[in-house]
Image (spheres, rainbow, N blue to C red):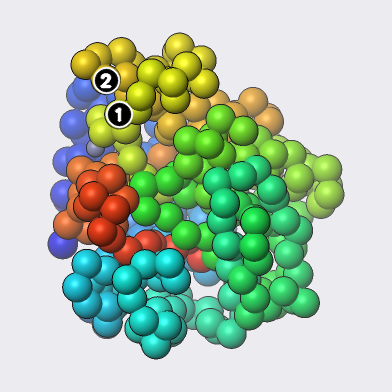
Amino acid sequence: MLGNGDAQLYHNSLRFYGIIKESENTMFTINRKNNIEYLTIPSFEQSGLVRHAFSTRIGGVSTGETATMNFGFERKDTPENIKRNFELLCGCVGINPDKLVMAKQVHGDIVLAADKTDAGRRLEGVDAFVTDDPDIAICTFHADCVPLFFLDTKKRVIALAHSGWRGTAANIAGKTVGKMIADYGCDPHNIIAALGPSIGVCHFEVGQEVADVFDTKYVIQGEKPRIDLWALCKDQVLACGVTESNFTLSGICTFCRKDLFYSYRGDNMKTGSMVSIMQLNA
Ligand SMILES: [Zn+2]
């Protein structure tokens, strides 16, 4: 269980080690409702324009290696448990689970414009959604891979992206913001963005062949190279014109906090999956 002070301590240690800068807006909020723990982003909350959450593993009905709040259909869990977990989390946030549009992710760079005709569907081959439709809730799945949240507070357009190392190498973050601008007329200066719990540079060790895919400024050489996906995703978002003060970094590593989050690497692949969910208020 993570107390609010706990998250602050973690952020302070990241500041101490220089992984995040003093000036950065770092805090996600930890919420607890009906024994369910989930995170929200203060800037998104304060906008009054959306309901949203990033789940934890606390408070659901799953058992065994996916205990307790798994959302991953490909994990060792039953469809009944997953359905119940969606009802529980959506109940906390005020989202109708029948309105969810879910990504069946492939570590690609396809960003889909979703609308009410997609409600209740799971869309294959998609790693990011954009929508301006308040009748649907968009949903992506994560268990180390970077979750990204976007909201244009003037145009009322939302987006979610799943950015693992392949997606990050393919700049799915930039492509998501690019679609908000190109297809929805968003102005990047009006977009607030956030990067949720995922594997940090403290733990994301890769082989040299993976490290070679990335600009050396995002690779820390050691016994094994480590990649800073957070810094790269953030730079990709800022390169689209989103301002730094509108970017919130959770600063929470899923591997470090296996007690609170599923970590594909931290749990040796025997794990469940979290979700990002978000819906525009009508
Ligand atoms: Zn870590």
**How many residues crowd mark 1 within 10 Å: few (<14), some (14–19), many (20+)?**
many
Ligand 1 falls in which quarter?
top left
Q: Nearer the viewer, residue 189 or 144?
A: 144
Drawn side of residue 1 relative to residue 150, left or right: left
Please name the residue shown 77% across and 77% down the image: 117
Residue 201 location, quadrant: top left
Q: Quadrant of the N terminus?
A: bottom left
Please name the residue shown 28% across and 60% down the image: 271
**Label 2's element?**
loop
Quickly name the residue at label 2.
Answer: 224
Mark 1 vs 2: CB contact within 8 A: yes
Quickly name the residue at label 1.
Answer: 205
Distance Cα–Cα, label 1 vs label 2: 6 Å
Residue 179 location, quadrant: top right
- Name the amino acid type tagged 1: Glu
**Relative to 108, is 53 above or below?**
below
Drawn side of residue 223 relative to residue 113, left or right: left
- Name the amino acid type tagged 2: Lys
x, y percent for residue 131: 72, 61
Q: Is residue 130 visible?
A: yes
**How many residues crowd mark 2 within 10 Å: few (<14), some (14–19), many (20+)?**
few
